[in-house]
Image (tube, rainbow, N blue to C red):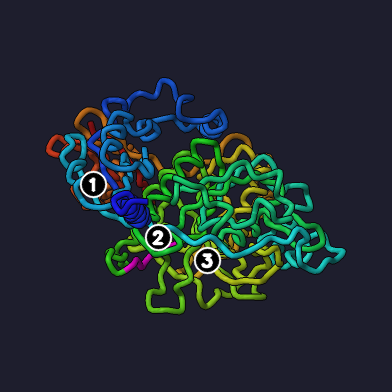
Amino acid sequence: MSRLLLAVLLFAASFVFAVEVQAQVEDRYVVFLRDKGGKAGDVAHPEDFLSDRALARRGRQGIKVDSLDVPVYTMYINRMAETARIVGKSKWLNAVMVGVAGGDEAVREIEKLDFVVGIQRVGSYEKEELANASADWDLSGDRSDDPCGVSRPVLSVNGIVSLHDDGFTGQGIMIAVTDDGFCNVDSLQGGWQDRIVCAKDFVNNADSLVYDIGSHGVRTFACMGADVEGCVMGAAPGADYVLLRTEYLKGEQPAEQYYWAFAAEYADSIGADIINVSLGYNLFDDEYPSFTYDDLDASSPMSRCADIAATRGMVVVCSAGNEGSNSWKRITVPSDGVNVLAVGALAANSNSEKAHYSSIGPSADGRVKPDVAAPGTVHSINRNGVVVSGSGTSFAAPVMAGGIACLWEALPEVSAAGMIDIVRRSAGNYGNPDNQLGYGVPDLYKAYLDNRGVDGLISTCADTARVEGQSLIIPDSFASDITTRAVLFDINGRVVMDIHPKGVNRVSLHNLPKGFYVVELSSGTSVSRNTLLYE
């Protein structure tokens, strides 16, 4: 081989290696868009972007398709794809995440586009290591004559085992599980194989690592989906499941909020009824600003999307956080969401005492948080197929989510908002909530007995504001109260309007730029928060 050819080959090899190394680290930016390309009102054919199941869920609850449901404008996405890789898109935030490797030129080009109103670096992506774990075909755990096995004490606390005894196991309910990955779930013998509808990776959308990475998600999923008679039983062994990876394992970054938003929108589009969120954020890596307590007012991107998910007719169940014993102490994002059911943890072997680690409330704007409590010490299945015990609000949340699935099967006419209200009302401290366990420990079987036979939908969803022309229309239920306060936030969470309408139900917006906003109406103990488009 000639020296020239060898030199060329070495140079080519070094160039390929450099590109591969460079490609391993990708900066990620969220790009906020001006509008939906004039398509925001194009809701005449919702079947183009929502499944039959999603539309049926909304139909049962009287929820109309609106501008938030319209996808991000394809032409805008295609323009950005000319200079950067598209990682994900959020129609609820009207934003797109792009990945950029090797310089900021692509970012500068995107900033120049006339439909871009903001761009923010939210993280980076570096190849994650696959889990070093193998699944045993035979589940490792003791067997007993009790069908619930070691799970009976946990399932008894919130009345879930009684719902099972009456034949309600979550059948017909679809639960979306958002977590760090579900290593080996596709081969573990947990009794759930026929009930996993689909699995999707929103962190690494180039390759799905759903079943190759993560251990936390396996255990939270098993708290709901396990069905190994005489050994371990989940709270909803009859439900269907959607497994969605949203947690990045090589850092703690704001980008994870957006991965979750992508997943929540997907869950909505395929017709999920419940979203379990055994995740929470307060501190990010040093290069990104962390949350403060003042941020716990449901204004973060993740909390806003969780609230929007609730307005689409899903019940969003979230772990309150495990910060109760450290300096933060408070709940974490997105459990501060207005329409999110935040779940605190009970101490081991207790039906009423808060676990020392369970985060406390209230939210920054004074709302009761957490909402309710469930056992935090549970038996679950790990990624090696071993039945193990663990503690945390991450387990309390899926216990409650699974229990709600069983209750919803028993009370199929109840709306999502009504379901949250029923659950709260069944809790022992409903009349005197506190910052430790909120409304207390729900008795879901009692909720079933108290509400079966109720005709029609049960809904406590507060009226929401809307835009007409250049005006913000405040619903009469708020406008008639002179104490009502209306606050408008822009896409970056900045307050752009803060007024007391004092009986007026129409407020001018003509001085504001067109775009997406979050509006919060508060009056006494009533709070309404929703996203709207001013165009």
Q: Of the two numbered discs 1 and 3 on the same chain, state the one appearing first in sequence.
A: 3
**For the residues marked 3 and 2, what is the alpha-carbon distance in whole angstroms?**
14 Å
Residue segment shown in magenta: 280-285
Give the labeled residue for mark 2. Answer: 333
Characterize the magenta stretch by its predominant secondary structure.
Answer: loop
Residue 405 appears left or right of 202: right
Crowding at dot 1, Cα within 10 Å, few <14 / some 14-19 / many 20+, comes out as some
Q: Nearer the viewer, residue 362 or 533?
A: 533
Q: Position of residue 515 (x, y in %)?
A: 23, 37
Mark 1 vs mark 3, foreground winner is 1
Under mark 1, the amino acid is Asp
Under mark 2, the amino acid is Val
Crowding at dot 2, Cα within 10 Å, few <14 / some 14-19 / many 20+, comes out as many
Vertical placement of residue 85 versus 53, above or below: below
* Tag shown at residue 490: 1
Label 1: which secondary element: loop
Mark 3 vs mark 2, foreground winner is 2
Q: Is residue 281 magenta?
A: yes
Q: Residue at x 67, y 43 (%)?
A: 409
Give the labeled residue for mark 3. Answer: 344
